[in-house]
Image: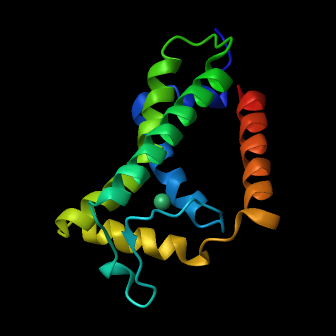
Amino acid sequence: MSERRPAEFFLNPYVAFAAGFASHFITDAIPHWGYGLKSRLKNEKEPLKEDIVLNREFIGDLTRIVLDFLFGIFAAIFIFQGGNEFAGASASLLAGMAGGLLPDFLQFLYFKIRREPFISLQKLHIYVHQAGDIPALPYGMPSQIIIIIAAVIISKVIH
Ligand SMILES: [Zn+2]
């Protein structure tokens, strides 16, 4: 019988999905840099009234989001799938990524539908994001690179 390793826990795609979903809110609570969306109507006083306008700017935003999304998927597969000995890891990897991306997609649904459960999720999203955005430099990008490197090292160590 082989010993159980912590990583095996996350080999269940449902667990990976839930962990990805939760990790989005946990990491959103850490002040970070993000490229702003030009089609987003900001409302600092009443964040629940923010919106995304489906205009020309939105097409540019969507293009950036899709490129970001593709880069993230390929980077994750390249980093985590290389030499993976566990069968089923790809399903978990994809489920984890989907769970991690879902909260931002749900924000879009909130903007367009404004009904439960999207309202409560949006409130949670606004709450965890309170620390706010910081500029890319001097702290935004360097701190994000450190978090990425730390996450990769931890994942390789517990593997
Ligand atoms: Zn978010």
**x then y, percent, for residue 58:** 35, 56
The extreme front residue here reads: 56
Q: In this view, does 75 lie above or below 44?
A: above
Residue 84 in view: yes
Q: In this view, does 112 lie to the left or right of 147?
A: left
**x then y, percent, for residue 38:** 44, 65
Residue 15: image quadrant is top left
Question: Which of the pair 5/119 is nearer the observer?
Answer: 119
**x then y, percent, for residue 103:** 40, 54
Q: In this view, does 73 lie to the left or right of 141?
A: left
Q: In this view, does 88 lie above or below 20?
A: above
Question: Which of the pair 111/125 is nearer the observer?
Answer: 111
**x then y, percent, for residue 99:** 42, 43
Q: In this view, does 66 lie above or below 3?
A: below
Where is the C terminus found, in terms of image quarters? Answer: top right
Rendered residue at 44%/22% (across/down): 91
How many numbered marks, from 0 up?
0
The extreme bottom residue here reads: 45
Q: In this view, does 116 lie to the left or right of 23?
A: left
Question: Which of the pair 155/106 is nearer the observer?
Answer: 106
Rendered residue at 42%/53% (across/down): 61
Residue 16 in view: no
Rendered residue at 58%/13% (across/down): 86
Q: Is residue 147 left or right of residue 101?
A: right
Rendered residue at 28%/61% (across/down): 55
Residue 26: image quadrant is bottom right
Where is the N terminus found, in terms of image quarters? Answer: top right
Q: How is the image coloured?
A: rainbow
